[in-house]
Image (cartoon, rainbow, N blue to C red):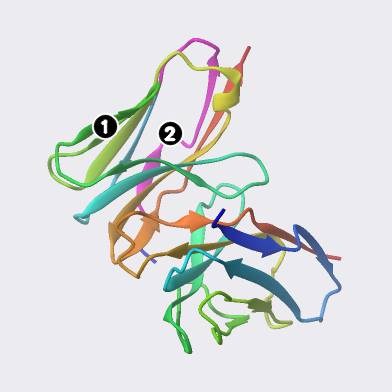
Amino acid sequence: GQQLNQSPQSMFIQEGEDVSMNCTSSSIFNTWLWYKQDPGEGPVLLIALYKAGELTSNGRLTAQFGTTRKDSFLNISASIPSDVGIYFCAGQKGKLIFGQGTELSVKP
Amino acid sequence: DGGITQSPKYLFRKEGQNVTLSCEQNLNHDAMYWYRQDPGQGLRLIYYSQIVNDFQKGDIAEGYSVSREKKESFPLTVTSAQKNPTAFYLCASSIDLGGVYGYTFGSGTRLTVV
């Protein structure tokens, strides 16, 4: 099935550093979503983007819907240990299509 | 509070046995989904249902079966035909198939074949 290309696959960073991850696709999407999954739990929605070019923040998180509608990025500023987890992008055209995930590790 | 409940959290199955994973939602959502998650592979769609008594295969439906007899419930059966069933299974729901507000996920069931 169709998938999004999410990168990087994993990141190991120091507490306080900023983080950036992105998703790209050959298809146009109507909506981009970013989820976070804590170990052993289901993903939880962080940010939803509905318009090309839209830039949305949620606390230390900022996400953008690419102008071509084929990509999106998520930034986390001043990372803290509880940011640890797997971050998924998802593009919507009918059902959601998920990226492979970015596993984030934060060293105190 | 509304949400999705998956049970059990952990499940052990002997090889050759069928097992059913439960998913219940009280969000009044029409659409429900089952995903399988393996390390480093993201979320792969097994089955989805738009309305009661109707469901469609996703990308990896072989060895799985579902039913949707009630709006609130979408159980997944992992059959003995599934060759590699050990995985983390996630159920999700959305207002409708378009789900413009995204999916709500359950907390998952980890299935281990012993």
**Place of residue A46 in the rendered image (x, y in percent of width and height, measured from the top left):** 42, 38
Residue A26 visible in this rendered orientation of the protein = no
**Place of residue B92 in the rendered image (x, y in percent of width and height, measured from the top left):** 51, 62
Q: Tell me if residue A97 comes above or below residue B81 in the rendering.
A: above
What is the number of the mark on residue A8? Answer: 2
Residue B47 visible in this rendered orientation of the protein = yes
Q: How many marks?
A: 2
Per the image, label 1 sits on a secondary structure element best described as strand
Q: Nearer the viewer, residue B12 or B113?
A: B12
The residue drawn where x is 58% and y is 76% is B73
**Place of residue B84 in the rendered image (x, y in percent of width and height, measured from the top left):** 69, 69
Q: Residues within 10 Å of mark 1 (few under 14, many from 20)?
A: some
**Place of residue A24 in the rendered image (x, y in percent of width and height, measured from the top left):** 28, 44
Q: Is residue A7 magenta?
A: yes
Q: Amino acid at mark 1?
A: Thr
Magenta-colored span: A3-19
Q: Tell me if residue A14 comes above or below residue A96 in the rendering.
A: above
The residue drawn where x is 56% and y is 47% is B40
On whether disc 1 and disc 2 are found on a single subunit, the reply is yes
Q: Residues within 10 Å of mark 2 (few under 14, many from 20)?
A: some
Task: Please indicate whether residue A100 sits to the left or right of residue B37 in the image.
Answer: left
Q: Tell me if residue B76 comes above or below residue B95 in the rendering.
A: below
Q: Amino acid at mark 2?
A: Pro
Task: Please indicate whether residue B58 sits to the left or right of residue B15 in the image.
Answer: left
Viewer-nearest of labels 1 and 2? Answer: 1
The chain to which mark 1 is attached is: A
Task: Please indicate whether residue B14 sits to the left or right of residue A82 in the image.
Answer: right
The image quadrant where one finds the C terminus of chain B is bottom right
- Looking at this view, name the residue that lies furthest to the front: B1
Residue ID for mark 1: A56
From mark 1 to mark 2, how far is it between C-alphas? 21 Å
The chain to which mark 2 is attached is: A
